[in-house]
Image (spheres, rainbow, N blue to C red):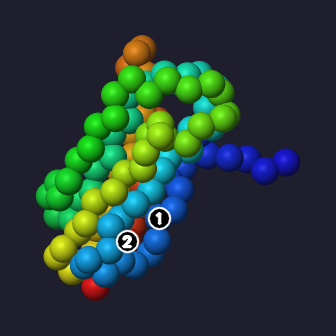
Amino acid sequence: SSHNAPIEILGLSKQYSTSQPVENQVKIDDSSFDCGDLYITIYSSGQNDVITQSGFLEQCFTSGSKNLPLGESFSEVIDAPGSYEIVTEMVSKQLKNISTKGKFTVK
């Protein structure tokens, strides 16, 4: 049986151009999260400077059926070449949180 991470970033490429939007969705595979606030933050790798942050509040979904954010995708153009880290975090009403991160470069 395959073990899925409780939160996954979908559609993240390893490399983007400066005109290409970084677009992705988040898959939650944790049955204790049926509602929560989703935050997606992109940092400059190694410097912890926040380049952009998006919050998608009140993301309610039935277990195992939805990619988030609901009905849309995160989309940001990063116009400065470099290395970046994207962090996705889901925070429930009980302030439980799950998060994951990924890395990509912009050329």
Place residue 21 in its image quadrant. Answer: bottom left
Q: Which mark is residue 58?
A: none
Residue with the mark numbered 1: 12
94 left or right of 47 in image: right
Label 2 SS: strand
Residue with the mark numbered 2: 104
- Against 15, residue 31 (above or below) is above
Q: Which amino acid does label 1 sit on?
A: Leu
Q: Which residue sits furthest right?
A: 1
Within 10 Å of the Cα at label 2, are there few (<14), some (14-19), or many (20+) other Cα atoms? some
**Residue 37, position in %: x, y?**
37, 28
Q: Which residue is drawn at 31% across and 81% down?
A: 17
Q: What residue type is labelled 2?
A: Phe
- Against 19, residue 32 (above or below) is above
**Residue 82, position in %: x, y?**
23, 78
Q: Which residue sits furthest bottom?
A: 107
**Residue 67, position in %: x, y?**
55, 42
- In the foreground, 51 or 11: 11
Place residue 65 in its image quadrant. Answer: top right
Please say if the residues under marks 1 and 2 sit with CB atoms less than 8 Å apart: yes
